[in-house]
Image (cartoon, rainbow, N blue to C red):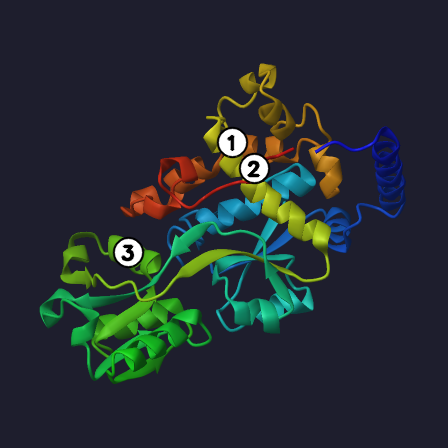
Amino acid sequence: MKFSTSFGAGVLVAAGLFAGSAMAQGTGSATIDAINKRGELLCGTSGQSAGFSLPDSQGVMRGIDADHCRAVAAAVLGDAKKVKFVPLTAQARFTALQSGEVDLLYRSTTWTLGREGNLGALFASINFYDGTGFLVKKASGVKSAKEMDGATICVAPGTSTELAIADYFRVNKLKFTPILIQDASEITAAYESGRCDAYSTDASGLAAYRATQGPKATDHVLLPEIISKEPLGAMVRKGDDKWFDLVRWTYFAGLIAEEYGITAANIDTMTTSTVPEVRRLLGLEGDMGKALGVDNKFAFNAVKQVGNFGEIWDRNITPLGIPRGINNLWNKGGLHYAPPMR
């Protein structure tokens, strides 16, 4: 499509005036301004989920959610270490975001209409496509969720899992008794002690728990039914579009880097690339960062300090034995797809 020269010039002038006005007022994002002033990103996580966010033996938070928090810190502040992890329960997480206790939630939180419509929040990315599953003891002999009529099921209250189970049993005309427990360690303890017949949460969480059981892992069976769609990702408050855009495009940057084979180890050598999108990704041209209220090297910093999407996955999820499957890139049969950076 072609436009007249005068029209194009008018658009450029208007864009320039808008950009100048925004810069005069700061970054154009109250959240980014607050983070810059504080010198630290406040990221809400679980802190209890292997592969997603769980402190290691040295107290360092590890997991895919934790690393995506670090990537955002690198994008905003230029330093992935400038992040404070705030452990939150499933019930407390939304209040913490709404009140400003955290800038961002990366807490295995499912994107739903109800949450966007009722909680004053938006989902900026999906870093894990998941689904609700069931874990039972092998000794029970149960091989299908449809064999669990009358079962007691341990589940965390205030989660999408709780509703997914209710919907599934209702549709299949089965009965069950929920055992609602907030703390993840208490849920697994109740399941292990036999207080409940099954443990239900996102299938990734169940696989992660089973993987931590060592030689006893085979004593537990992950049933074949995945009863819901659980797209997990980053959640931010409504009303700060530029912050939403930055969190979203930091995630997209990790995907684009993986597509082009750009890693934390080779990113410096990629600065000689002549591929336009690679040059924009690395902040060499295009002012992509400035458009988001940050440095043009926001994506470069995130990838160099934390890695591309695949590196984050391999570091945290692959050791749990969870196949990448639909969490692969779009060109490898998966669902992760980044719009063009231009």
Q: Nearer the viewer, residue 271 or 35?
A: 271
In the rendered structure, which amino acid carries the disc numbered 2?
A: Ala
The residue sitting at 49% across, 69% down in the picture is 89
Q: Position of residue 84 (x, y in %)?
A: 60, 52
- In this rendering, the answer to whether 279 lies above or below 203 is above
Say which residue label 1 marks.
Answer: 257
Q: Residues within 10 Å of mark 3 (few under 14, many from 20)?
A: many
Q: Does the CB distance between marks 1 and 2 fall below 8 Å?
A: yes
Say which residue label 3 marks.
Answer: 207
Instruction: Mark yes or no: residue 62 visible.
Output: no
In the rendered structure, which amino acid carries the disc numbered 3?
A: Ala
The residue sitting at 35% across, 40% down in the picture is 333
Q: CA distance from mark 2 to mark 3?
A: 28 Å
The residue sitting at 35% across, 61% down in the picture is 131
Q: Position of residue 152 (x, y in %)?
A: 25, 81
Classify residue 284 as left or right of residue 267: right
